[in-house]
Image (cartoon, rainbow, N blue to C red):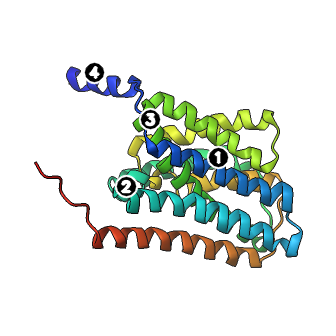
């Protein structure tokens, strides 16, 4: 038991320097996601084409193409690595879901339970947005960015740097630095939770989306009912990309290395 505990502590506090080409792609993907979000929010704005330009840039190009599609392509097609290396795994699914419900329950009592919720018609688009963007954030920030940083630098440096990148991502919303400091600690919370099972199913579909819902409701964001359908379609596209990646892996298994 002592040996196991010592090995676990060494793994937690280990620091290494093993940067590789994955980090280059992580950096490029971060720039693409943040740049697209900034373009959608600051340059284009939410009122062009009745909000359609914002939706296309933010949800389809930024979150779906660059945030989910690019990591899937790099890991499955280029690197020939399993989807589990993006947190897309059912390994330990029961534990992940149980912990997620426990975390979400505590979060609900401290947040949504104390907030005046909008009507169902107004609330539904916000739920759809949180589910779709929550899936993107779980895959991109935790499965993709956090795990690549851990492989290169170790667990604690990865959690700190990954949370800093997550906070800085909100530059794309034109957010002040004071709020990004708060989001750094939110990033720490989600990163530590994810690392317990290394599965996005400890964060999604309840725990992380609920955190986004709280922000959306408090900010008073109002979306038309049709937006619920739009974000539901975005989520379906993201899940379809995961399915295609899994199908590709089954049809193109990584060849065994010769001894």
Image quarter of the N terminus: top left
Nearest the viewer among 155 and 201 is 155
**Mark 3 to mark 1: distance in Å?**
41 Å
Within 10 Å of disc 4 (Cα), the crowding (few <14, some 14-19, many 20+) is few
Looking at the image, the residue that sits furthest to the right is 47
**Mark 3 to mark 2: distance in Å?**
15 Å
**Mark 3 to mark 4: distance in Å?**
26 Å
- Dot 2 corresponds to which residue? 79
Looking at the image, the residue that sits furthest to the left is 259
Residue 60's spot in the image, x, y percent?
66, 68
- Dot 3 corresponds to which residue? 19
* Mark nearer the N terminus (3 vs 4): 4
Residue placed at 75% from the left, 69% from the top?
Answer: 55
Q: For the residues carrying marks 3 and 1, which lies nearer the camera in this image?
A: 3
SS at circle 2 = loop
* Mark nearer the N terminus (4 vs 1): 4
- Dot 1 corresponds to which residue? 109
* Mark nearer the N terminus (3 vs 1): 3
Task: Find residue 48 and report its image quarter.
Answer: bottom right
Nearest the viewer among 111 and 212 is 212
Residue 50's spot in the image, x, y percent?
87, 75
Q: Which mark is residue 6?
A: 4
Q: For the residues carrying marks 2 and 4, which lies nearer the camera in this image?
A: 2
Left of 46 or right of it: where is 208? Answer: left
Residue 248's spot in the image, x, y percent?
35, 71
* Mark nearer the N terminus (2 vs 1): 2
**Mark 2 to mark 1: distance in Å?**
42 Å
Q: Is residue 98 shown above or below 49?
A: above
């Amino acid at each position: 038991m002592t040996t196991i505990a010592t090995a676990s502590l060494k793994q937690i506090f280990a620091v290494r320097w093993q940067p590789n080409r994955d980090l280059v792609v992580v950096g490029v993907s971060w720039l693409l996601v943040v740049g697209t979000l900034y373009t959608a929010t600051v340059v284009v704005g939410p009122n062009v084409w009745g909000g359609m330009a914002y939706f296309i840039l933010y949800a389809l190009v930024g979150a779906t193409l660059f945030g989910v599609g690019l990591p899937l392509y790099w890991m499955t097609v280029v690197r020939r690595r399993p989807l589990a290396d993006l947190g897309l795994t059912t390994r330990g699914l029961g534990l992940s879901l149980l912990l997620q419900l426990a975390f979400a329950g505590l979060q609900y009592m401290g947040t949504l339970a104390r907030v005046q919720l909008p009507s169902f018609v107004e609330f539904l688009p916000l739920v759809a947005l949180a589910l779709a963007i929550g899936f993107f954030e779980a895959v991109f920030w935790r499965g993709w960015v956090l795990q690549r940083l851990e492989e290169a630098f170790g667990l604690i440096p990865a959690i700190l740097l990954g949370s800093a990148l997550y906070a800085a991502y909100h530059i794309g919303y034109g957010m002040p630095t004071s709020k990004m400091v708060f989001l750094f600690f939110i990033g720490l919370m989600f990163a530590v939770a994810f690392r317990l099972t290394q599965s996005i199913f400890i964060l999604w579909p309840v725990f992380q989306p609920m955190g986004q819902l709280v922000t959306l409701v408090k900010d008073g964001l109002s979306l038309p009912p049709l937006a619920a359908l739009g974000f539901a379609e975005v989520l379906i596209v993201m899940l379809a990309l995961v399915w295609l990646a899994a199908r590709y892996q089954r049809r193109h298994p990584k060849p065994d290395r010769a001894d």
